[in-house]
Image (cartoon, rainbow, N blue to C red):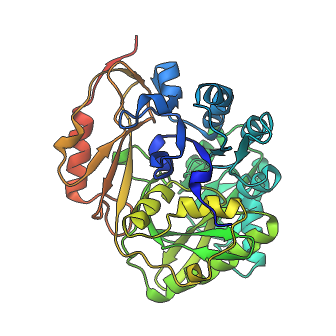
Amino acid sequence: MAWDLHDYRLVTASAYPGMMAPLTEHPSCVCVLSGDADADLPGTRTLSLERLDGVRRRWRFGDVARLADFVPKVLAEAPADDRPILLVPPRASTAWDAAAAAWPGRVRLAAGPLDVVERLAEDKVYIRQALQGLGVPVPEALALDRDELDFTAVARRLDAPFIAQTPNGAGGQGTYLVRDAAELAAARQAHPHVTRWLLSRYAGDVTINVAGVVHADGVRLLPASLQISGIAQLGYAFGGYCGSDFAMPRVDPGALAQAYLHTERIGAWLATQGHRGLFGADIAVSGGDVAFLEVNPRIQGSSWLLSRLQERHGLNPCLHQHLQALLGEPLDPADAARPVLPTAGSHLLVRWTGPGGMVRDVPRPDSYAGVHVTGLPAVGVTLLPGAILARLESTASLSEPDGRGLLPATGALVDALTAAVAVDPLR
């Protein structure tokens, strides 16, 4: 029997509602659980930590897992319906497993097994070693205990600057560009409980992402995107994920071919580990060379944008493919071809860099022609540093071709948007 999303009721969970579009817009979606609130979605279908607490902050994975506590409320308030609930978080956790297990037959978790997810998502050192064993090109690296972090010794081996990473950071969190001993000491001090670090040779300024969907019988590759990261104007430090651009990455064609080839190999390996559904690989490109930096065995921050672009052209959105794979649907042979995206699109996340305070005024989103602005906080909400201030979406590129800076028009828009937000400081 063919898989059909209408056979389920959807409950999505994410840091912000748009991260699960177009699932959130599907007629089968009965509730959207999120960190941020979103005025663009009907209030009867949403439950956010922002509205519960009156505070918008930078939501970590553990914060989003707190939303699992509200699954009983969703079930109690949902209209009578014989269809099972399909609960869709970014990835599995103990909280989401427990929420689904409490309602056997009524709630099914659309996420991979917890033991598989934790092994793949929580240890960059393990993944880097596994990639090397597969013959995938990776940067030269060292895995060192906390008390072995000596700048001179590492720089002698990897040169400076080099990259220092905590094993379990996501979205660029816990990633540092280290140019001297003071920066290495600061990184270590910022993570007092991290006992093991991954140190890597700097592999290049341009980073692309190639994603795929792992089915039981094969891997479907998805179009590559440029990773936009580390832009201070958007509120990010080095390595922090700012957004994605699905215009054809301006990199050497041979490097792009290598990126697809090795990503498919990684997908096949993930299948043997028990992973199903979406995954993505972050890949540094320098000339014709590629170096695989990490693997994300989950829904990514760019999955919603790719889904929307695919949907606009009558293609099966990758978030739908993710659910199909998790529910056991075999790979469609027609999906095994080289990934093609008929259109381009990009998005950015703008974070608040000012002091925490209560929002007194926000601009009108429709005042920015050509760029779709969503996700602005509501008046009266307490806005904390690091929280998402706005989300930008465009059919044109918003960043420089290397993903490390904004185009002049985008920079002017971000400045105007930020200046138009009035916040009364906390007392």
Query: Is 211 positioned to the left or the right of 328 in the image?
Result: left
Give the quarter of the figure containing the N terminus.
bottom right
Q: Is residue 362 above or below residue 218?
A: above
**Residue 272 image point, x, y percent:** 81, 71
**Residue 366 image point, x, y percent:** 20, 42
> Quarter-wise, where is residue 251 in the image?
bottom left
Labels in figure, total: 0
Q: Is residue 180 visible?
A: no
**Residue drawn at (29%, 45%), measured in percent from left and top?**
373
Looking at the picture, tell me which residue is in the foreground, 353 or 197: 353
**Residue 250 image point, x, y percent:** 37, 78
Name, please, the residue furthest toward the bottom: 254
**Residue drawn at (77%, 35%), measured in percent from left and top?**
103
Query: Is 260 positioned to the left or the right of 401 in the image?
Result: right
Query: Is 238 positioned to the left or the right of 346 in the image?
Result: right
Q: Is residue 192 visible?
A: yes
**Residue 256 image point, x, y percent:** 50, 82
**Residue drawn at (59%, 68%), measured in percent from left and top?**
159
**Residue drawn at (27%, 64%), measured in percent from left and top?**
396
Give the quarter of the figure containing the C terminus.
top left
